[in-house]
Image: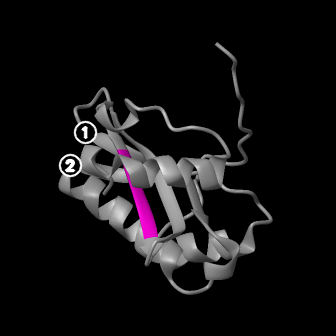
Amino acid sequence: MITAPDAELLTRAVRIFMNTDAATDYLETPGTLAFVATEGEDITGWCWGSQLARPDGTSMLYLHQLEVAEPHRRKGIGRQLVSAFMSEGRAAGAMKMFLTTGAHNTPARALYASLGGGLATQGPTENYWFLL
């Protein structure tokens, strides 16, 4: 997991995968989780999300983004990142994890299914964004 001493890795990953600058206080925000995969000096993938408190006293994880650089796909990096994300959340008390992915993103859906994920049972959903 990326922590304040590793902030430079997060800065580089945000530049590579989001094409913007990293917020310097992200790692200090309660509940945030970020993991960066490297091969030597190269960043090969990353994931980030949050641990969310629930009104019933439990918590759950939200995996917001998982991305592996094109030349490094199909090598298990995504699996390692998601597994680390889930393990860290489980250790912090999270009971469930959710994420969204495109219906046609077959590789991602296969990965999530192989890690024990199942489609949500509440039926078809639509995602909404709000600018605040």
Q: Are marks 1 and 2 in contact (CB under 8 Å)?
A: yes
Kindly tell me whether residue 30 is visible in this rendering. Answer: yes
Q: Considering only order in the chain, which callout, 2 or 1, is on the residue closer to the N terminus?
A: 1
The residue at the point 38 percent across, 70 percent down is 83
In this rendered view, identify the residue nearer to me: 22 or 65.
22
In x, y percent, where is residue 24?
41, 32
Check disc 2: other Cα within 10 Å, few if <14, some if 14-19, many if 20+: some
Side (left or right) of 28 relative to 36: left
Q: Which residue is mark 1?
A: 58
Front residue of this view, candidates 76 and 123: 76
Q: Which residues are magenta?
A: 33-37
Q: Position of residue 47 (x, y in %)?
A: 49, 57
Point out the image quarter for the C terminus.
top right
User: Is residue 79 inside the magenta stretch?
Assistant: no
The residue sitting at 35% across, 61% down in the picture is 86
Q: Which residue is mark 2?
A: 93
- Residue type at mark 2 is Gly
State whether residue 64 appears in this view: no
Compared with 131, 128 (above or below) is: below
Q: What is the quadrant of the N terminus in the image?
A: bottom left
Helix, strand or loop status at disc 2: loop
